[in-house]
Amino acid sequence: MDIFVLDTSLFTNPDVYSQFEKDQIGAVENFLSLASHSRVQLYMPTSVYEELNKMVELGSLKPKFEMVVRIRSPRRFNLMVPAEFVYEFIEEVRYRINKGLRIAEEHTKEAGKLSESDVGKLINKLREKYREALRTGIIDSKEDLDVMLLAYELDGILVSGDEGLRSWADKVGIKLIDAKNFRYILESSAIRS
């Protein structure tokens, strides 16, 4: 039986959840219906489930969600990850911080030449470029790390639309699927009566 570890992007990214239905809550309902009739095990770390509950109002779907998806944190104190992963992560963070500093320096020089009314636009541009430089393509939250660690621990298949999370999970050998194909996988593993 395949084990899948779910990230919030399955339910919060419209490009991903629309495979179940265009409406977000309808998508969660359809996902739960398909998942409850499939021969797969589904997991979600507690931190990710809490994040999901802040982003999507599950309401009356909460009990069914908890019956279908096992909510469980990775065993962080017992889990060993490759040291190479830590080295690469630190190098990547250092590179991104330096890139962010260069972006801030460029925008600071440009701000001196602008009128006060244009400075606000420049600040918004700075924020966008800075966020992109530091957060795109990297694990940038404890929730991302929990999803990755749980998939690693369970030798599960990671289901996420987050490219940074997918990229880093691939570096440590975690099995991945494109989250946009998850409906097909659930339908293919449905219990036939």
Image: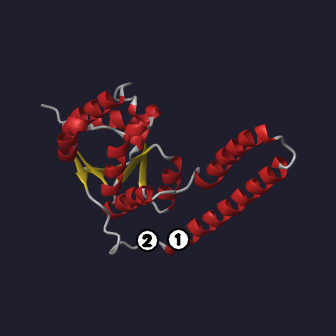
| Residue at the outermost front position | 116
The amino acid type of the residue labelled 2 equals: Val
- Element under label 2? loop
The amino acid type of the residue labelled 1 equals: Val
Q: Position of residue 188 (x, y in %)?
A: 28, 35
Q: Is residue 136 above or below residue 30?
A: below
Q: Is residue 25 above or below residue 10?
A: above
The local crowd at label 1, few if under 14, some if 14 to 19, many if 20 or more residues have their Cα within 10 Å, is few
Q: Position of residue 31 (x, y in %)?
A: 28, 34
Q: Quadrant of residue 72?
A: bottom left
Q: Is residue 109 above or below residue 172?
A: above
Number of dots carrying numbers: 2
| Residue at the outermost right position | 113
Q: How is the image coloured?
A: secondary structure
Task: Tell whether 102 sits left or right of 47.
Answer: right
First along the sequence among labels 1 and 2:
2
**Residue sitting at 38 percent across and 45 percent down?**
8
Q: Position of residue 17 (x, y in %)?
A: 39, 33
**Residue sitting at 39 percent across and 62 percent down?**
149
- Element under label 1? helix
Q: Position of residue 130 (x, y in %)?
A: 66, 51
Q: Are marks 1 and 2 in contact (CB under 8 Å)?
A: yes
Q: Quadrant of the C terminus?
A: top left
Q: Is residue 25 above or below residue 79?
A: above
Task: Tell whether 136 sits left or right of 156.
Answer: right
The local crowd at label 2, few if under 14, some if 14 to 19, many if 20 or more residues have their Cα within 10 Å, is few
**Residue sitting at 19 percent across and 38 percent down?**
36
**Which residue in the protein does label 1 denote?**
86
**Which residue in the protein does label 2 denote?**
81
Q: Is residue 190 visible?
A: no
